[in-house]
Image (tube, rainbow, N blue to C red):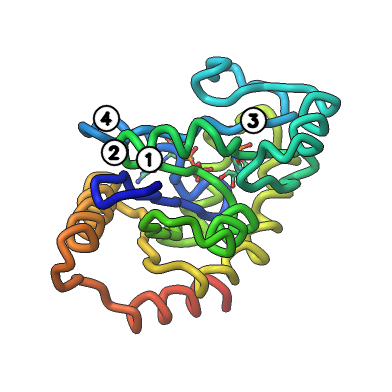
Amino acid sequence: MPINNDGIMIILSSPSGAGKTTLVNLLSKLDNFEISISHTTRQPRQNEIPNKDYYFTDEKEFKRLIGNSEFLEYAKVFNNLYGTTRTPVIDKLNKGKDVLFDIDWQGADQIKNNKLDYKLITFFILPPSKEVLFERLSNRHMKDKLIVEERMKQFERDVLHWINYDYVIINDDLNKCYEKILKLIKAEKNDDSKDYDLEFIRNHVEKLTS
Ligand code: ADP
Ligand code: 5GP
């Protein structure tokens, strides 16, 4: 049974390229934070390490895990399947570890709807502008202009989900963004007042989508 010393769940989502993986990796260096490693059917990128960045699996294995009800959440993203298995997450939380999730809005919705007995904080990361997002995606996928185009198109749809998150953070300066997230996590844990300006975020989203 969950008790008060349990860890908390922290979800970071964003349109692709806004910087959530970078932020999750930074946060995971802190004491007591651990990343939930997802399963995916997509091919590893050059710099990715199997069983650390993802459990890379084929579709057959992924479907077997679905059939065994092993996923806390799963979704199709950019034509590949991604999912979070339940047992490792619950084990970490029961040991008092805070678990970081780098998952999309579909997964975040499912975890929210599961209403687990653990505190949940959700963050949506946005780029400072579409131009900066294009630059970041182009740097990450230097050889594949099609991927960049596809992800810029998807941005228009993904950004609309900002409204379902506890906090939306603009990732302009990486360190400032990281500090903001950390401050909000601490404030949530200690039930302190939160430094957060929803109107500013609303205006930023309007600029990004106009
Ligand atoms: P996501 O996980 O949201 O798709 P990544 O974390 O992979 O995004 O970041 C996309 C690219 O942008 C990476 O090359 C990363 O190094 C870079 N990046 C992330 N945050 C910043 C930032 N604040 N300033 C400049 N580059 C950044
Ligand atoms: P990428 O292929 O760039 O690593 O990830 C593509 C998208 O899939 C990102 O939005 C990422 O957050 C999301 N994602 C990664 N793992 C999971 C997961 O386990 N579940 C869900 N729902 N989305 C995931």
Marks 4/1: CA distance?
Answer: 17 Å
The answer to whether mark 2 and mark 1 are in CB contact below 8 A is yes
Circle 2 residues within 10 Å: few <14, some 14–19, many ≥20 = some
Mark 2 or 4, nearer chain start? 4
Give the label, 2 or 4, closer to the camera. Answer: 2
Q: Amino acid at mark 4?
A: Lys
Q: Amino acid at mark 1?
A: Leu
Q: Work out whether residue 26 can be spotted.
A: no
Q: Amino acid at mark 3?
A: His
- Which image quadrant for residue 45? top right
Marks 2/3: CA distance?
Answer: 23 Å
Marks 2/4: CA distance?
Answer: 16 Å
Rendered image: mark on residue 93: 1
Q: Which residue is mark 4?
A: 29
Q: Which residue is mark 2?
A: 96
Q: Residue at x 57, y 74 (%)?
A: 209
Q: Residue at x 71, y 48 (%)?
A: 75
- Which image quadrant for residue 145? top right
Task: Give the SS element for disc 4.
Answer: loop
Rendered position, 139 above or below 176 = above
Q: Position of residue 130 (x, y in %)?
A: 52, 60
Rendered image: mark on residue 182: none
Apparent side of residue 140 relative to residue 121 in the rendered image (left or right):
right
Task: Give the SS element for disc 1.
Answer: helix
| Ligand 2 has an atom within 8 Å of the beta carbon of the residue at disc 3 | yes
Marks 3/1: CA distance?
Answer: 19 Å
Rendered position, 184 above or below 163 = above
Q: Work out whether residue 146 can be spotted.
A: yes
Q: Position of residue 128 (x, y in %)?
A: 40, 60
Task: Give the SS element for disc 3.
Answer: strand
